[in-house]
Image (spheres, rainbow, N blue to C red):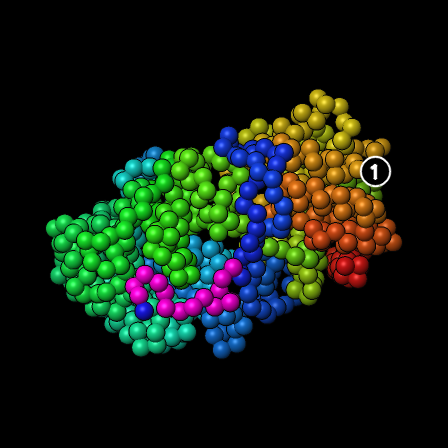
Amino acid sequence: MTACTAPHPRRSSSSGTRRRTAPSSPPSGTRSPAGPHSRPVGTDGRPSRPRWRGSAPSPRGGRSGSTSSLPRRDRREGAPLSTASPETSAAPEPDLISVGRVCVDLYAEQEGAPLEAVQSFRTYVGGSAANIAVGAARQGLDVAVLTRVGDEQLGRLVRERFTAEGIDTRWVTTDPQRLTPMVLLAVRPSDDFPRIFYYPEPADLGVRQEDVDAAPIERARAFLLGGSALIEPAMRSAMQAAVKRAREHGTPVALDLDYRPVLWGVADTAQGGQMTGTDADVVRAYESVLPSCELVVGTEEEFRSVVDADDTEAALRAVREQTSALLVIKHGAAGATAYAGAISEGEHVAGFPVEVFNSVGAGDAFMSGFLRAWLDGDAPARCIERGNAAGALVVSRHGCSPAMPTTAELDYFLPQARTLERPREDGWLAHLHKATTRPAVDDLQVLAVDHRWQLEELAEDLGAPRTSVARLKGLLAEAFTRVAADLEGTPGILLDDVYGREPLEAVTGQGYWVARAVELAGSRPVALAGGDDVTATLRRWPAEQVVKCMVYCHPDDDPALWHTQESRVLRLAEACMDLDRALMLELQTPSGRRYEGDDLPRTLERFYRIGVRPEWWKLPPVEDAEQWYASGEVVRRGDPHCHGLLVLGQSAATDQLAASFAAAAREPLCKGFAVGRSIFAGPASDWFGGRLDDEALVNAIADNYRAIARLWAQRR
């Protein structure tokens, strides 16, 4: 066994299974909405999106009688909450088990400001063990995290974010006595990155022997130990036992030095960014595990600190005396050096010259890229190259874990890494990151109830006050929750915030696929909520809500009208890209016109030509299969990562919907329906007119929703 390769052969379940291989170059003939560096290259093929492993039970809570008590579902799109135990889960054994710091990062939104001047933060899962786990999972490894979280909202956030990334949480234990820790970080491009660690009695440093005993260390391809796991004596003892067990069963141990003086009590609490300083306890702790490691990775400061050496060469020699492991020193922008044997024979690989936006997180990204290649048996230089590339992309983005790149991003970046100095401005790379880090959703069955002016007119015609429209929306959402738990497909709901604000809040955060209308109802040219500053509007929306925009348009519209519509939709697409929001464009013809012949694909093509790439298209219920196929071809050319097409209802009768479903279902990109008035128009009329009470209305809507779902399933 050599130090530069992992001893376990690659298992078929671990390589490229969680995320499918995909084209990483942008389609020809399109331009990016996000910067001048996009390089159009012809491509075809299918999207690269994560697949979710294993199976999960139905949502907890069963039938819900009101929108204030919805059954909670897992946040990943369409997947029920998993309550599987280690004994019953169908998930494969992990390639990598990661243990160490797991916390919640609060990242400043104001760039370049000191923490004292920060006004708002973004919330991410963080900590080196968590960041590396996310990065490795995005590169195709089956990853598990061994940790503890608090029995509170932040602990649930960590679990849900892990699940959304496909990370195995069977060995994430809830600790009722400790809290999930937090770290506050400023965003600065220099080495001066202020951080405050809120780590009083942290849950992640509370892992004990019983937690280790439950983890399948002997069946993993590698055990990744973060140095911070050695801080507390009880956890240190558990980690020493874990390392011993790994060695006994031939599981290689990789040590991420992850030395943070403030957590060891070596630096003051206000010096969270300090990376130097040590004491005898630190040295003893690392000495207890170094001899059992096959890979040790850290910065120059970390290597010096863990052996209390004055210079880097002396530190390397001191570490080499304790272990025959492959030693890797990270030099930041300068790259990294690997020492497979003698310290005098290091192999250096230069870093990539990219503009730094955020200097935190690059080391964890490096480790994730390095580990993926190391577990594949690649030579140290190749491992470092992948690590350098991952780190270069992360320093160009906001946050640590959300910035971790996928394999598709690295495959796009590496061939041009020496010349692409501003990856943050590369529009296709930004789209690739957004598209390949979102879970795939199939068989989406959406109850569309974002109608406003239509319901206003209906209420007025039947003598009901406008205030009753808001109450109707609540009852429609209640019908949705009654049906959602039993649907065979993925349940979704589309709402507005004019009359549907309360039910919108009730369904958000429950694991449903939720979309929210952003356009002003009936506007042509399309007008957006918030006017010119749609970014400020979307910033206030929960991130999970899909941004839906309806555009009344036809390929033969007046050029001036097209220019206005395109500029506004492009502005919306850019806002969604900046804020990492999913976008769904709904196309409707203006009054008196229809999509005939190649009208629909021509309309789609116009948006792709200006660089608009929505995750979803919501299209009229045309009954011509050729139009659906032609539309699918346009989408495949324009964006091979598009999530799919949905069929809308337009008040169509059941036989018309059946015909349009049959035509649409022949196109593989058609992933479901988003139907509203065909489901609720009749019962809503009776309810406004006083012929149905609330319970009868909810029952009627639920029955109609189920019927449409069955109709879709039959045609599909």
Residue 349 picture location, percent across and down: 31, 47
Residue sitting at the far top: 560
Q: How many marks?
A: 1
Residue 391 picture location, percent across and down: 37, 46
**289 or 674: which is nearer to us?**
289
Residue 161 can be seen in this image: no
In the rendered image, the quadrant that contains the C terminus is bottom right
7 in the magenta segment: yes
Q: Is residue 693 above or below residue 211?
A: above
Q: Is residue 132 left or right of residue 229?
A: right
Secondary structure mainly formed by the magenta segment: loop
Location of residue 335 (image quadrant): top left
Location of residue 561 (image quadrant): top right
Q: Is residue 690 above or below residue 454?
A: below
Q: Is residue 143 left or right of residue 554?
A: left
Residue wearing tag 1: 596
Residue 64 picture location, percent across and down: 64, 63
Q: Is residue 309 above or below residue 610?
A: below
Q: Amino acid at mark 1?
A: Glu
In the rendered image, the quadrant that contains the N terminus is bottom left
Residue 553 can be seen in this image: yes
Quick one: label 1, few (<14), some, or many (20+) residues within 10 Å? Answer: few
Q: Is residue 533 left or right of residue 479?
A: left
**504 or 531: which is nearer to us?**
531
**356 or 279: which is nearer to us?**
356
Residue found at x 35% / y 71%? 251
Q: Is residue 328 left or right of residue 150?
A: left
Residue found at x 56% / y 62%? 52
Indicate the secondary structure of the residue bearing disc 1.
loop
Residue 532 picture location, percent across and down: 57, 28
Magenta residues, start to end: 2-16
